[in-house]
Image (cartoon, rainbow, N blue to C red):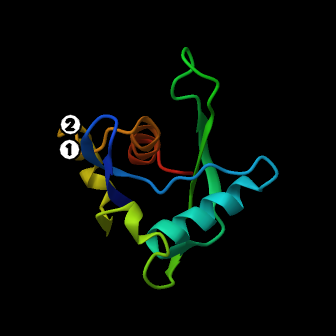
Amino acid sequence: MLLLWRYRFIPDSWGWELPSAIADPAEDLAAAAARQALAESGWEPIEPRLLLTLEPNRALMDSVSHVYWTRHAIHRGPPAADFEAERIEWISLSAVPALIADSQIRAACTVAALLLLYHAGPG
């Protein structure tokens, strides 16, 4: 899994996360996911597909997250948005449960997506 080691100011903590974006309502979501992954990591996803859609804070706000995945990505060079992450690494899916248990992965969308892939596979 391609993950970004990021600092989040509000919780004042570091953690592994998937690349993420806020898409324009008129933008194709798969294209937005691919664009942002390339900008934040330097890796371009090939034919990203929807993995899951979730509402991470359903009781508190009207917010929907769409998580895309792919089996193939091409390294295009350094990320354009190199300020987004301290580190960018490919991490084995087998490491996911331990990283979550160790609080190195806390973001709800990242946890949900990685656990789905770990337990069920993307299909």
Asked whether residue 1 is in view, the answer is: no
* Residue drawn at 59 percent across, 21 percent down: 61
* Residue drawn at 32 percent across, 42 percent down: 9
* Residue drawn at 71 percent across, 53 percent down: 29
Residue that badge 1 annotates: 98
Q: Nearer the viewer, residue 20 or 51?
A: 20
| Amino acid on which the number 2 mark rests in the picture | Ala
Choose top left, top right, bottom left or bottom right for residue 30: bottom right
| Amino acid on which the number 1 mark rests in the picture | Ala
Residue 77 vertical placement versus 56 (above, below): below
Q: Residue furthest right?
A: 26
Q: Which quarter of the rendering shows the N terminus?
A: bottom left
Circles 1 and 2 in contact, beta carbons < 8 Å: yes
Helix, strand or loop at label 1? It is helix
Where's residue 95, x and y in %?
Answer: 24, 53
Where's residue 72, x and y in %?
Answer: 53, 72
Q: CA distance from mark 1 to mark 2?
A: 5 Å
Residue that badge 2 annotates: 101
Where's residue 82, x and y in %?
Answer: 41, 71
Q: Is residue 116 left or right of residue 29?
A: left
* Residue drawn at 70 percent across, 63 percent down: 31
Asked whether residue 85 is in view, the answer is: yes
